[in-house]
Image (spheres, helix red, strand yellow):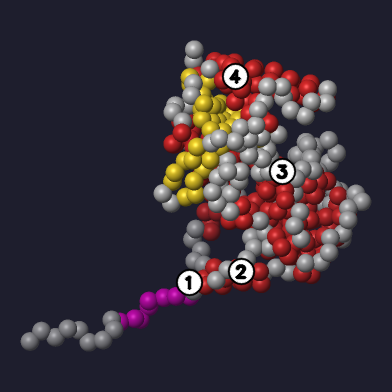
């Protein structure tokens, strides 16, 4: 049977297993029937890393590797029930604890996602053979995705259980602005960042906020003054998409769907949609900021520059879609094309430009050679 077929059969079996868990939970059973608490485990020795506790069940490929969530371990209900299922169908199975969790060595206070990612890769490299089906629960789903990127040849299928792929990003965004701010930079990086920050204009920020609120025409809360608050106000891309849509006639909006989301990739996608629509609207490419300039707050002055260019383009168009004070943005110069006939163009070929002087009245009459002729003795 091909690997894809085995993965498909496994997924169907996992769905049936999930239904059984839900059914028994509704009936009041706190644990899947047949599950047992297992305490014996082996240790994966690594020369420069903490030892990892694991349990391995031999069987046929593709094997199954379970990645628990942040507050779980390899003796959790899901891991044990999944092991029983793999044993019943004869597939290999591995469950383990990340460093600092469960029975593995290490301190949870020193753990990072990068270190747990290394743990997953160590398990794949040292404890498995051939393609594996990774089953990630909660935060384990994110680690599962990172492992698939790092070891694509070791992956037969991915199965996510309430995958928390954006959990860390969402938590970071909920921190106070002062805590979420990046640490200090040093040397040349600090000098460059200071020059970028000096370009940010607080007065321009107030004008742009007023324009966005008026242009969107909705009950939008006014953000507190300051660069970080302005960045947080715009970083999900929702207001920017509404802004560019309101600069178009009704029914001709460039962005069809705008959704408020806390997922990082969705927010950055909406920022990208705004930037693309702004460029089509007429903003020059050199005036367009990068997505990370706004989402990570790298260059908020560039964000102001793009919004200023967008406002100028809207005022210049004067198509009735712009709302706000026209004096907030400068009006671009209009074309002043001139038309010349073929005869006028031919006459112009005989005229010397004034930058090169004038040939009118020039004559060589009465002129002699300069200096004495060369004497040959």
- Residue at image mark 1: 356
Q: Are marks 2 and 3 in contact (CB under 8 Å)?
A: no
Does the magenta segment cover residue 367? yes
Instruction: Name the residue at 81% across, 46% down.
Output: 242
Left or right of 157? Residue 263 is: right
Q: CA distance from mark 1 to mark 4?
A: 85 Å
Q: Nearer the viewer, mark 1 or mark 3?
A: 3
Q: Nearer the viewer, mark 1 or mark 4?
A: 4
Q: Quadrant of residue 87?
A: top right
Left or right of 16? Residue 10 is: left
Q: Residue furthest top?
A: 1
* Disc 2 crowd, CA 10 A, few/some/many (<14, 14-19, 20+): few
Please identify the quadrant where the C terminus is shown.
Answer: bottom left
Residue 297 place in picture, x, y as percent: 67, 59
Q: Are marks 1 and 2 in contact (CB under 8 Å)?
A: no
State which tag comes first along the sequence, 3 or 4: 4
State which tag comes first along the sequence, 2 or 3: 2
Q: Please state which of residues 218 and 250 is positioned toward the viewer in this rendering.
A: 218
Q: Please state which of residues 337 and 373 is positioned toward the viewer in this rendering.
A: 337
Residue 113 place in picture, x, y as percent: 59, 48
Instruction: Give the structural element (helix, strand or loop) at label 1.
Output: helix
State which tag comes first along the sequence, 1 or 2: 2
| Above or below: residue 261 compared with residue 135 | below
Q: How many marks?
A: 4
Give the magenta-colored segment's residue range: 358-368
Q: CA distance from mark 1 to mark 2?
A: 57 Å
Q: CA distance from mark 2 to mark 3?
A: 27 Å
Q: Magenta-highlighted stretch: main secondary structure?
A: loop
- Residue at image mark 2: 184
- Residue at image mark 4: 10
- Residue at image mark 3: 263
Instruction: Name the residue at 84% across, 58% down.
Output: 211
């Amino acid at each position: 049977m091909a690997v894809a077929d085995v993965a498909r059969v496994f997924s169907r079996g996992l769905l049936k297993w999930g239904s059984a868990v839900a059914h028994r939970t509704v009936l009041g059973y706190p644990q899947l029937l047949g599950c047992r608490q297992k305490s014996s485990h082996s240790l994966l020795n690594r020369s420069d890393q903490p030892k990892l506790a694991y349990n391995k069940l031999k069987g046929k490929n593709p094997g199954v590797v379970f990645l628990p969530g942040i507050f779980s371990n390899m003796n959790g209900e899901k891991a044990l029930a999944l092991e029983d299922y793999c044993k019943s169908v004869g597939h290999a199975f591995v469950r383990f604890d990340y460093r600092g969790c469960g029975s593995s060595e290490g301190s949870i206070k020193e753990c990072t996602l990068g270190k747990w990612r290394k743990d997953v890769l160590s398990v794949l490299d040292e404890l498995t053979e051939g393609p594996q089906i990774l089953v990630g629960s909660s935060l384990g789903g994110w680690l599962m995705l990172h492992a698939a990127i790092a070891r694509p040849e070791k992956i037969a299928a991915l199965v996510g259980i309430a995958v928390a792929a954006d959990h860390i990003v969402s938590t970071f965004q909920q921190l106070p602005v002062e805590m979420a701010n990046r640490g200090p930079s040093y040397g040349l990086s600090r000098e460059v960042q200071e020059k970028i920050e000096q370009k940010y204009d607080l007065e321009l920020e107030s004008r742009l906020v007023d324009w966005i609120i008026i242009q969107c025409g909705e009950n939008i809360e006014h953000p507190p003054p300051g660069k970080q608050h302005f960045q947080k106000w715009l970083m999900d891309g929702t207001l920017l998409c509404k802004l560019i849509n309101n600069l178009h006639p009704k029914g001709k909006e460039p962005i069809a769907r705008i959704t408020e989301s806390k997922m990082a990739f969705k927010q950055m996608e909406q920022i990208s949609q705004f930037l693309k629509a702004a460029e089509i609207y007429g903003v020059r490419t050199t005036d367009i900021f990068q997505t990370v300039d706004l989402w990570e707050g790298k260059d908020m002055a560039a964000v102001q520059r793009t919004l200023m260019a967008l406002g100028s383009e809207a005022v210049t168009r004067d198509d009735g879609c712009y709302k706000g004070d026209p004096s907030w943005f400068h009006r671009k110069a209009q074309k002043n094309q001139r038309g010349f006939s073929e005869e006028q163009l031919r006459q112009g070929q005989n005229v010397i430009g004034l930058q090169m002087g004038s040939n009118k009245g020039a004559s060589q009459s009465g002129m002699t050679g300069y200096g004495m002729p060369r004497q040959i003795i």
